[in-house]
Amino acid sequence: MAIMITSECINCGACEPECPNNAIYEGGAEWVLGGKTYGESQLPDGMADGFWSAEYFYVVPEKCTECKGFFDEPQCVAVCPVDCCIPDPNREETTDVLLKRKEYLDTVGR
Ligand code: SF4
């Protein structure tokens, strides 16, 4: 499953530079996939919303591979000082799905 950041986030920013998929963005920031920029209400076709935050760092689920393909454990989880990076219970995904996502991101760009 993708990682999500809860409202316990203190906006320290430790996670963002550690993400190999560029899946983490500061609250209120636009995000990028495949060279295109999206905002709060702009989503690629078929992507579920509900992840964007104006107040604290957020993870774009369709860019998170739980660090599969790069590291043995999710890097944001490892560095977060308040343990607010947690598995998203609404986005359970198999390792196969996560590795296919990495391949997709390799192709389209992060
Ligand atoms: Fe990025 Fe890895 Fe955290 Fe997913 S688990 S948001 S890929 S650092």
Image: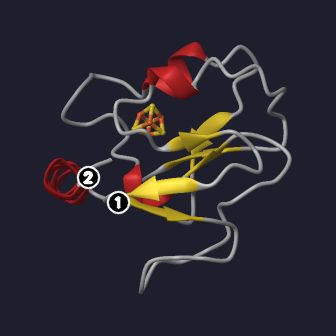
Q: Amino acid at mark 2?
A: Leu
Q: Which residue is mark 2?
A: 98
Q: Which mark is residue 44?
A: none
Residue in view at x 69 percent, y 49 percent: 29
Residue 71 location, x and y as percent?
27, 22
Determine the CA span between mark 1 and mark 2: 7 Å
Residue in view at x 52 percent, y 17 percent: 78
Residue in view at x 21 percent, y 58 percent: 108
Tell us which disc is closer to us: 1 or 2: 2
Residue 37 location, x and y as percent?
50, 61
Residue 61 location, x and y as percent?
48, 57
Q: How is the image coloured?
A: secondary structure
Number of labels in the image equals 2
Q: Amino acid at mark 1?
A: Glu
> Is the C-beta of the residue carrying label 2 under 8 Å from the nearest atom of ligand 1?
no
SS label for mark 2: helix
**Sooner in the amino-acid sequence: mark 1 or mark 2:** 1
SS label for mark 1: loop
Residue in view at x 56 percent, y 28 percent: 16
Q: Which residue is mark 1?
A: 93
Q: Is residue 2 above or below residue 86?
A: below
Q: Evaluate if marks 1 and 2 touch, with contact meaning CB atoms under 8 Å apart.
A: yes
Name the quarter showing ligand 1.
top left
Residue 87 location, x and y as percent?
54, 45
